[in-house]
Image (spheres, rainbow, N blue to C red):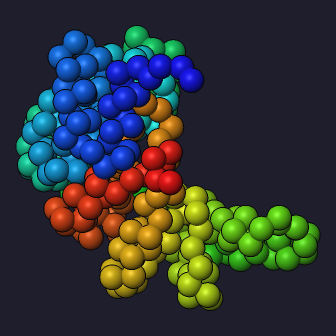
């Protein structure tokens, strides 16, 4: 077995729920200029409600965006900066940080998705956090039709699934792709069974929260935290729980701490 790198050791501690040991490793790496460690520290700071630290560490990430392996992590950083703006109400600082990020994106290839994400942040800061972060372009009726058409096509094709969980993930995935919350709630109410793909779990939890079923929404998240899986070494916790409009009001300090302490991904079993 190959020896783990220091960032992999730090992530392993974090995914085991040992945040103290993870912080020790990450702080040492960050002091040495490791950008991935800074990204991981952003996530921990956000879960601990330390929003000034979120901005401090994110600036390091924005200075060298090419150091990250995936767009996912960069987008998470952008969204956590937006959340920090809402918490701190310092929109001038948020706007300046976003413009700093935009200047540094010229140094990476295939940067259009990054530019769009940062441009949304600049616009959000310009509105001082007022209104929705992104504008919904489709009506609920149109999203409903897409979802129902998807169900009809599935029924006509009689697609075979090896396991019930495969079919369930497919159905919840359709609701998520079409952003049709009532569809996810209907699937959940059918037999209270849950998907095991965390993106789908987050969507059904958000759907339940949107219709006033916050207690059930948290239980859905709690019961499937072990399903969350990082896509690169800097990821230590599901950022979507802190930025989803339906879920973030549920994330009290105690619940945030519970997420950090719950074994996740490869350390869940």
x, y percent for residue 94:
17, 37
Q: Residue at x 83, y 64 (%)?
A: 162
* 101 in relation to 154, above or below: above
Residue 209 visible (yes or no): no
* 214 in relation to 233, above or below: below
- Of residues 204 and 127, the one nearer the viewer is 204
x, y percent for residue 81:
24, 41
Q: Quadrant of residue 63?
A: top left
Q: Quadrant of residue 13?
A: top left
- Of residues 63 and 220, the one nearer the viewer is 220
Residue 200 visible (yes or no): yes
Give the residue at the far right of this rendering.
157
Q: Residue at x 59, y 68 (%)?
A: 195
Q: Residue at x 32, y 31 (%)?
A: 10
x, y percent for residue 250:
27, 70
* 269 in relation to 187, above or below: above
User: In the picture provided, is 110 more to the left or to the right than 159?
Assistant: left
* 92 in relation to 193, above or below: above
User: In the picture provided, is 205 more to the left or to the right than 241?
Assistant: right
Q: Residue at x 58, y 58 (%)?
A: 197
User: In the picture provided, is 234 more to the left or to the right than 178?
Assistant: left
């Amino acid at each position: 077995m190959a020896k783990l790198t220091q960032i992999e050791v730090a992530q392993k501690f974090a995914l085991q729920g040992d945040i103290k040991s993870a912080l020790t490793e990450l702080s040492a790496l960050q002091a040495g200029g490791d950008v991935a460690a800074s990204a991981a520290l952003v996530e921990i700071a956000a879960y601990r409600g330390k929003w000034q630290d979120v901005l401090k560490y994110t600036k390091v990430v924005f200075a060298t965006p090419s150091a990250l392996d995936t767009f996912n992590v960069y987008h998470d950083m952008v969204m956590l900066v937006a959340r920090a703006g809402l918490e701190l109400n310092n929109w001038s600082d948020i706007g300046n940080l976003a413009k700093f990020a935009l200047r540094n994106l010229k140094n990476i290839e295939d940067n259009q998705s990054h530019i769009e994400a940062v441009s949304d942040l600049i616009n959000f800061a310009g509105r001082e956090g007022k209104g929705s972060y992104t504008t919904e372009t489709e009506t609920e009726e149109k999203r409903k039709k897409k979802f129902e058409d998807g169900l009809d096509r599935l029924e006509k094709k009689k697609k075979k699934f090896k396991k019930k969980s495969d079919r369930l993930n497919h159905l919840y995935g359709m609701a998520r792709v079409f952003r049709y919350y009532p569809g996810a709630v209907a699937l959940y109410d059918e037999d209270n069974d849950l998907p095991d793909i965390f993106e789908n779990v987050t969507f059904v939890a958000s759907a339940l929260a949107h219709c006033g079923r916050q207690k059930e929404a948290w239980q859905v998240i709690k019961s499937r935290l072990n399903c969350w899986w990082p896509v690169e070494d800097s990821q230590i916790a599901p950022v979507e729980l802190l930025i989803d409009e339906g879920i973030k009001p549920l994330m009290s300090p105690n619940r945030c701490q519970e997420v950090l302490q719950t074994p996740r991904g490869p350390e869940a079993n």
